[in-house]
Image (tube, helix red, strand yellow):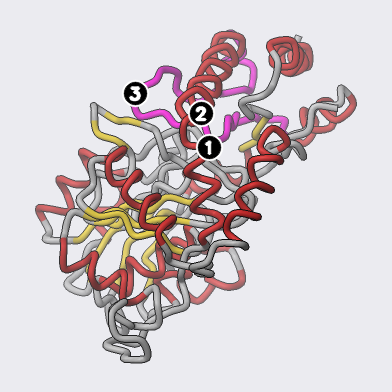
Amino acid sequence: MIPFFPPDLFDDDRETLLELLYELGTDEEQKFILGRRTAAFEELLRESTGAAHAVACSSGTGGLNLAVQALDIGPGDEVIVPAFCCQPVASSVVNRGATPVFADVDPHTMVLDPATWEELITDRTKAVMPAHIFSVMADMPSINKIARDHDLKVIEDAAVAQGAVLDGVPAGRWGDLGIFSFFQVKSFGTVGEGGVVLTDDEETARTLRMLRNHGQDGVHRFVHHRIGQNNRFDEIIAAFQLARHGGFADRLERRARIADYYSQRFEPLTGRGVLAPPAGRNGRCYYVYSLLVQRREELRSWLLEKNVGSHIYYPRPLPAQPAFSAFAPAGRGLPGAQYASDHNLAIPIWPHLTDAQVEYVADAVCDFFA
């Protein structure tokens, strides 16, 4: 079986994790959150991305929550978000009492379509939250231009795209704030949860640091300057990510090589009910390799018979989810988001797939359409 979610992502790191856990547990400092390891990890992220500030937090979702609150977005405000995405782009807005305004996505790339969202801007709009999806970064140059023209903040959901680069600019560095996630299956995933918020603004970074720790300033304990959150970063996760960062570039390159091979194999299927992600390296992240398939359930059953795992992401657009039905746009369709929900099917692309396994997966997809 070639599973979609591999159970052995961290097998090679088992001894490292045990050593780090012992080191942390026997450290005289006995500090398990927001300690010197977190500070070192933040500095590594700051240096590797070019951001002025990196603020580690409990998850990618937590990063979005912090970003929305740091911008003082609240009741009466609107944030434009993609209608096809993971739910935190909307819940982070709703949890602050603001309104998510759902914009359509491009039916091929599945990311926010710049042609559809400018018309949604009102005098209540405070920010736009583009999200990079699966293999493709959002069109950040176009999004940023529109945002600047309307004096909007850009919260860049780069949860799946750490290490990706668009036109020479790393993912997470296009927005006023950029968010990464370290959830286990992400490109730089870890053994638990974690995230980070990147920003170049010093005051915003200071606010983020207070908000993640119950509104405290890190100097005076139990003095709360803001209504904050428990959104702190674990020292063991920081230590583990520091230890694994050296191999991150190689893991990214392996994902990209697998994607290159898949795209080459699937290009002849374009007219036969299969559309592969746009090929290339610029603005590509290859966290997930998701096809758009006309006969999705049939292909998925075929792959299962061939012992190849697959996965459907976001089977409903966000406005069609019960949690966000109150924010569904009245009288406005979202055909791109609906198409993506109805047709996306992701196949394995984890970096320790062997060449033989990659070829087997591609053969299985091609044989179905033969």
Residue 308 sits in which quadrant? top right
- Residue beneath label 1, please? 244
Contact, CB < 8 Å: mark 1 with mark 3?
no
* Location of residue 44 in the rendering, given as x and y in whole percent from the top left corner: 35, 44
Q: Residue at x 47, y 77 (%)?
A: 230
Magenta-drawn stretch contains 274 = yes
* Mark 3 lies on residue: 282
Q: Residue furthest bottom?
A: 223
**Quick one: 45 or 19, which is closer to the camera?**
19
Circle 3 SS class: loop
Q: Quadrant of the N terminus?
A: top right
Q: Position of residue 47 (x, y in %)?
A: 27, 41
> Image check: 116 left or right of 58?
left
Q: Amino acid at mark 3?
A: Asn
Contact check, label 1 and label 2, Cβ < 8 Å: yes
Query: On the rendered structure, is 189 left or right of 76?
Result: right
Q: Residue at x 45, y 18 (%)?
A: 279
Residue that mark 2 sits on: 247
Tag 2 or tag 3, which sits nearer the N-term? Answer: 2
Badge 2 element:
helix
> At x 21% / y 40%, what residue is drawn?
142
Query: Residues in magenta?
Result: 268-296
Q: Is residue 90 visible?
A: no
* Residue 325 in sight: yes
Give the residue type at disc 1: Arg
Q: Is residue 162 above or below residue 348?
A: below
Give the vertical position of 71 relative to 214 (above or below): above
Q: CA distance from mark 3 to mark 2?
A: 21 Å
Up the image or down, 60 lies above or below 272; here it is below
Distance in Å between CA atoms under marks 1 and 2: 6 Å
Query: Viewed as shown, does residue 37 lie left or right of 193?
Result: left
